[in-house]
Amino acid sequence: MATSSSTTQLEIQLGEDDDLLLGAESGWVEARTSCDHLASLSSDLVHIPTLATPCNRCDQSSENWLCLCCKDVLCSRYVNKHMLQHFQQTNHSVALSYSDLSVWCFVCDAYLDAQVIPQLQSVHETAHILKFGRARPSRTVRTSISSFRWLVRHSNDL
Ligand SMILES: [Zn+2]
Ligand SMILES: [Zn+2]
Ligand SMILES: [Zn+2]
């Protein structure tokens, strides 16, 4: 019968923000799916400063990180390196970028996959809502279908 029309209702969400997240860095590298330095994460990552919060040290607001251990907002190594200095002084190694919502571990010296690591999922979700005003689209859609849009033609059913 009409078995071939099973994709009719398929709705693909390829948001603009996905391009923004993935295309932000030219040297995109695979993020780690585990990290041994999450023990000192703040116990309250539900309440985090707004993404417009300036660096606590130098008041810059162009490119900041949120320390996920003490929730300090500090500027990146491309501004005045205050997040890096904070890590060196306190050993708080895990931070979330307020520019592109990536999570970095200074000890692993690598990005962490916040959508896979359970301790990071909720804060990443919270930051995403703060940034875009809504939850991010589901990840399964993005990984199973690359930059490709389905053209669904209902008239095929005839
Ligand atoms: Zn780590
Ligand atoms: Zn700073
Ligand atoms: Zn800290």
Image (spheres, rainbow, N blue to C red):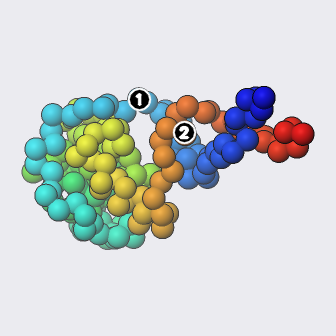
At 37% across and 55% down in the image, what residue appears? 125
Q: In which quarter of the image is the C terminus?
A: top right
Quarter-wise, where is residue 73 in the image? bottom left
Count of picture labels: 2
Type of the residue with mark 2? Arg
Percent position (x, y) of residue 79? 37, 55
Quarter-wise, where is residue 128 in the image? bottom left
Q: What element carries label 1?
A: loop
Q: Mark 2 points at which residue?
A: 142
Type of the residue with mark 1? Glu
Percent position (x, y) of residue 63? 40, 58
At 54% across and 39% down in the image, what residue appears? 142
- State which mark lies toward you, 2 or 1: 2
Percent position (x, y) of residue 108? 23, 32
For residue 38, above or below residue 47 = above
Sequence-first disc among 2 and 1: 1
Percent position (x, y) of residue 29? 43, 30
Q: Mark 1 points at which residue?
A: 30
